[in-house]
Image: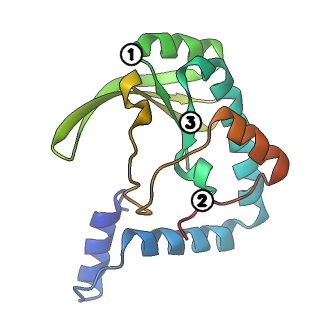
């Protein structure tokens, strides 16, 4: 089983003896359809539960502008999905302490370097288990990165995510809403 779309598409193309590859968006939308078909209403309930739990973890981080991103933001979760939150702070160890106090069972932490548009960026990743036993990944980015826009490799649109206030409103008004490109 492949973890990255590119490797999965290449493997599928080889198995089907074709050179034509679908876009990441086409693959993501089809995976979403399959997950909904397979999981049904349990998926919607789990999405709401994971969004609620994300809000619980985000509130103690309010001073660091937490944003819910990934499949829980999008509403495209499937079994094994994690809660992805990014925060903006120059001292990652502060974030670790806040999350531990909030009940996140920290499993590991590490710095990750990526290259975007020729520039190397470093972020601090915190992996853990939530009190409701969901996997969580919190990415701590430098405070100066807060205003930078990023493009989603999977869907091709801007990663907007949900702030605390937006998530609170969503959970009241339309807790199972999906955020997919139009």
What residue is at 44 percent from the left and 19 percent from the top?
89
User: Which badge, 2 or 3, is on the more N-terminal residue?
Assistant: 3
Q: Position of residue 140 (x, y in %)?
A: 43, 26
Q: Secondary structure at mark 1?
A: loop
Query: Mark 2 — residue?
Result: 76
Q: Position of residue 125 (x, y in %)?
A: 40, 28
Q: Position of residue 18 (x, y in %)?
A: 24, 88
Q: What separation in Å lies between label 2 and label 3 (alpha carbons)?
A: 17 Å
Report the mark closest to the observer, 2 or 1. 1
Q: Secondary structure at mark 3?
A: strand
**Could you tell whether 143 is left or right of 50 in the image?**
left
Query: Mark 1 — residue?
Result: 90
The quadrant in which the N terminus is found is bottom left
Q: Position of residue 71 (x, y in %)?
A: 56, 52
Q: Secondary structure at mark 2?
A: loop
Q: Nearer the viewer, residue 115 or 29?
A: 115
């Amino acid at each position: 089983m492949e973890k990255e779309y590119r490797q999965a598409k290449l493997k599928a193309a080889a198995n089907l003896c074709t050179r034509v590859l679908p876009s990441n968006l086409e693959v993501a939308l089809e995976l979403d359809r399959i997950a909904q078909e397979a999981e049904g209403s349990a998926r919607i309930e789990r999405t709401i539960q994971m969004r609620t739990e994300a809000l619980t973890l985000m509130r103690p981080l309010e001073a660091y502008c937490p944003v819910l991103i990934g499949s829980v933001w999008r509403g495209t979760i499937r079994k094994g999905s994690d809660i992805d939150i990014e925060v903006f702070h120059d001292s990652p160890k502060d974030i670790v302490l806040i999350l531990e106090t909030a009940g996140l069972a920290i499993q590991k932490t590490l710095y990750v370097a990526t290259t975007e548009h020729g520039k190397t960026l470093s972020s601090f990743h915190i992996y853990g288990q939530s009190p409701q036993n969901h996997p969580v990944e919190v990415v701590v980015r430098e405070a100066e990165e807060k205003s930078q826009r990023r493009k989603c490799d999977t869907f091709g649109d801007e990663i907007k995510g949900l702030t605390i206030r937006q998530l609170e409103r969503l959970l009241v008004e339309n807790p199972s809403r999906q955020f997919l490109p139009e």
